[in-house]
Amino acid sequence: MQLITSYTVRFSDCDPLGHLNNARYIDYMLNAREDHLKQFFNITLSEYHKQGLAWVTHSHNIRYLRPVFYNEIVCIESRLIELGESHVLVELLMFDEKQENLKAIMWTNFTSVDIKTGRRKDHPAFFMEFAATMKVADVDIHAGLQERIKTLRNPVQ
């Protein structure tokens, strides 16, 4: 299942030249992931929070490949590419409206934390079982982000 949504780039998110501000790419992508969880899996982060589950961003690895402009429609796809005992690695892809040109790619590593202590915490079994159904297997994480970009730009026919 492809998790994709479209967004229109807002004026307030752009620099004086009409380009999407670099920091706003991250916001758009993280908002898309949250929207995807709700839209496709009926999951809200607040529901997990009530169960004592939360995640903090450990790291972002982002590449800006093509400019995004004011009022442009972008499509953002999110995918779970790695599932660990206490972390998840999510890939976020930003394309143009026709999904022909890759604008940006981001790998974000989220660490599971205990909401009471703020310390790292292993995922509970019910989460691991569910997340395993979302994980995709076609991304070679060990090859790195640059190789992933090459694969996305030149897919094998």
Image (tube, rainbow, N blue to C red):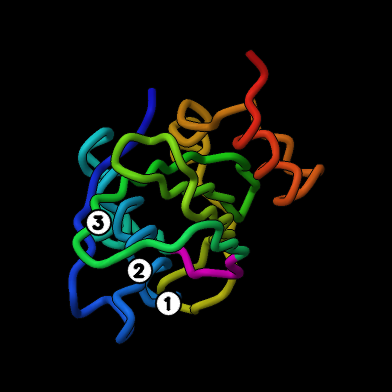
Q: Residues within 10 Å of mark 1 (few under 14, many from 20)?
A: few
Q: Give the labeled residue for mark 3.
A: 72
Q: Earlier in the sequence, mark 3 or mark 1?
A: 1
Q: Which residue is the extreme one toward the right?
A: 143
Q: Nearer the viewer, residue 12 or 126?
A: 12
Residue at image coords 59%, 61%: 63
Q: Give the labeled residue for mark 1.
A: 23
Question: Closer to the observer: label 3 or label 1?
Answer: 3
Q: Secondary structure at mark 1?
A: helix
Location of residue 16 with respect to 126 vertically, above or below: below
Tell me the amino acid under the disc marked 1. Ala
Q: Which residues are magenta?
A: 55-60
Q: Give the labeled residue for mark 2.
A: 27
Real-space CA distance between mark 3 and mark 1, rounded to the nearest whole angstrom: 17 Å
Q: Is 71 placed left or right of 29 in the picture?
A: left
Whole-percent x, y for residue 31 in the image: 30, 59
Q: Cβ–Cβ below 8 Å for labels 1 and 2? A: yes
Q: Examine the residues drawn in magenta and state their main secondary structure.
A: strand
Q: Which residue is the extreme one toward the front?
A: 17
Find residue 22 and report its image quarter: bottom left
Residue at image coords 24%, 45%: 6
Question: Closer to the observer: label 3 or label 2?
Answer: 3
